[in-house]
Structure formats: C-alpha cells, structure tokens
Amino acid sequence: MKGIVLAGGSGTRLHPVTRAVSKQLLPVYDKPMIYYPISVLMIAGIRDILIISTPVDLPAFRRLLGDGHELGVNFSYAEQPEPGGLAEAFLIGAEHIGDDTAALVLGDNIFHGQGFSTMLQRAVAQVESDKGATLFGYPVGDPERYGVGEADASGRLISIEEKPPAPRSNRAITGLYLYDNDVVRIAEELEPSARGELEITDLNLVYMHRGDARLVDLGRGFAWLDTGTHESLIEAGQYVQVLEHRQGVRIACLEELALREGWITPEDALRLGTAQAKSRYGEYVIDVARRAIATGVVRPGPPS
C-alpha cells in the first residue's frame, strides 16, 4: 500500500499564524504537526509516502523530512497549487500509487489509541485482499458539524451525510481513508462540486453504492483530533503533553516507530537522536536507542 499525506491549503482558520508557515509545520507540543499523520502510515506498515502541499510550502517539508532514508522510508513530494478537494490527491498521486492500493491521511489529523496499530494493519490487509474502501468513524457529540457515516451490523457503509441537520448516526468520518487501486479511476471520473473541488464524499459514495465501503468504528478509548483552529491546536498540544508526561513515552516519534518496525537499527536511532540531543525529543530517541542496544528490545511505545 502506498501512502499519501495531504498537507496543502492555506490554513485560513489559523490566520495570522499560517500566513507565513504551513499549518502542518506548526508544533503540536514537541513535534511538527505532520509527524502525527506520517506516524499513522508508518504503524500501518506503509513505507512509501507522498507529501502533497503547495509550491510555496514544499521546500520546508523537504528540509524537515528529506527523502526518508534515515527512517527506512521513502518520502516523495508533489504540488497542489490550488485547493482542489481531497479526492484530487489521487490524481496528483496517480503515478505514486501505480498499481497498488492507497492510504490517504489528512495532514492536520491526529489519531491515538490502544490497539490502533493492529486495527490499521488488519484494515490494510482487508483492502488488499477484498478490495473496496475502508473509512474510520469516530463518535462525536455534535455530528451535524461533520460528514457522518452509518454502517450496518456487518460494518458495511450504508449512508454518508455531509453536515446533516438530523444525523442518522453520531459517527464522524475521520481524515483517514484506505482504498483499492480503483480509487484513481474513480477520482478521474468525478465531477467538481459547486465549490469547484473534487469531493472525497463523492468518491466514497461510489464505493458505497457498489457495496464496497466499510466503516471501522474507532469507538471509546481513541482520540481523534482535528487541529484546524487555534483552540483545537492548543487542545491537541495539551493532550499530547499530558499523555507523554504521564506515560513516559512519545506519541508519533518517527525514529522510535522506524526502530520498532525494524526499518532502522538501534545504532541508526542513536545517531538520529544525538543530532537532536539538545531537545527533550532527542533525549528520548537516545534513551530508546540505548535501551535497544543494551537489551535488544525496543521499549513499547504508544500506537501512534
């Protein structure tokens, strides 16, 4: 499966902060926002990741992430000059996807919860074997503000509503999507919406009408955070801070995830941590690496 992180847009809800920097480069406590969606793809076992952003912001993402070889992954980059809708990511990333399945995660979404790694890997395997699409739903108290999905008892998606006044479900569709290879062809055949964009809901409806869309319920014990406003950005940072301080682990530590997956060695992780040794984040990577060198075991961390 190939991964795509959509990190475009102008972040107007965060102005004036985002007038000079991409929203996805803002810090969520101790690391850039984009680390969180990248970590989701990594724990799903995805190593080939395309970053889509604006022509102005892409150089900054390249400086931050490089080509990914230090983490045992491959980062590539593509431009989305103007907002064209989430589904446009599959047109921009068609060459990147090739003949493979695809995962799309939005650059401002944060996922965290026990068992997320197992859930994701199971969902990836299902898309690769059974085809179709898998979406992820999260219970919210105000579903009328979101795109809402409803599933039958088997988990098959049976309805999607955009900001419905009387929602049939309280399951908001999150910014994580898994698709078979048909997604590129379906995206090519979509018509722009009234706002001139290729809507992800229209793409998902194609799969739903074919009976090939599933909705996985993240449920209790999970956190899904959207960092699109000043308030939600602060709340996300506080959430990460509290968990990291209480548990003694780092959420979305890319070096630790790469080490746990066996994509880099403990010595590689030690070198990466040493390069950031003046920060608490770097100290943590050094500690994880030294423990792995001494014991041969990577200290268990959070799922994302």
Image (spheres, rainbow, N blue to C red):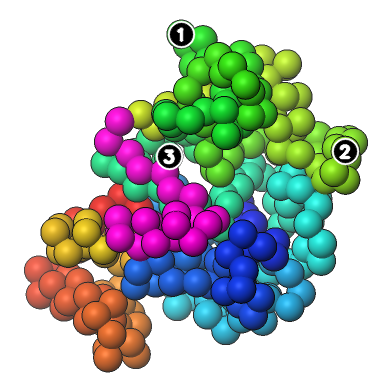
Please state the horizontal and vertical placement of residue 182, each as a whole percent of the image.
75, 34
Residue 194: give its label: 2
Q: Nearer the viewer, mark 2 or mark 3?
A: 2
**Mark 1 Cα within 10 Å, few/some/many (few <14, many 20+)?**
few
Membership of 230 in magenta stretch: yes
Q: Which residue is mark 3?
A: 120
**Is 1 drawn above or below residue 228 in the view shown?**
above
Mark 3 neighbour density, 10 Å: few (under 14) some (14–19) many (20 or more): some
Mark 2 and mark 3 lie on one chain; the one further toward the N terminus is 3
Which residue is nearer to you in this view: 47 or 213?
A: 213
> Residue 259: where, in percent of width, then height?
31, 66
User: What residue did someone put label 1 on?
Assistant: 153
- Mark 3 lies on a secondary structure that is helix
Placement of 21 over or under 41, stated as above or below: below
Q: Would you say residue 303 is visible in this rendering?
A: yes
Q: Secondary structure at mark 2?
A: loop
Instruction: Please provide percent x and percent y for residue 254.
Output: 38, 67
Which comes before the other along the chain, label 3 or label 1?
Answer: 3
- Relative to the observer, which residue lies in front, 64 or 56? 56
Q: Residue at x 63, y 23 (%)?
A: 164
**How far apart are labels 2 and 1 at the CA level?**
34 Å
Residue type at numbered disc 2: Ala
Query: Among all residues in the image, which is located at the extreme left?
Result: 295
Let me know if residue 84 is in the magenta part.
Answer: no
* Amino acid type of the residue tagged 1 in the rendering: Ala
Left/right of residue 44 with respect to residue 98 in the rendered view: left
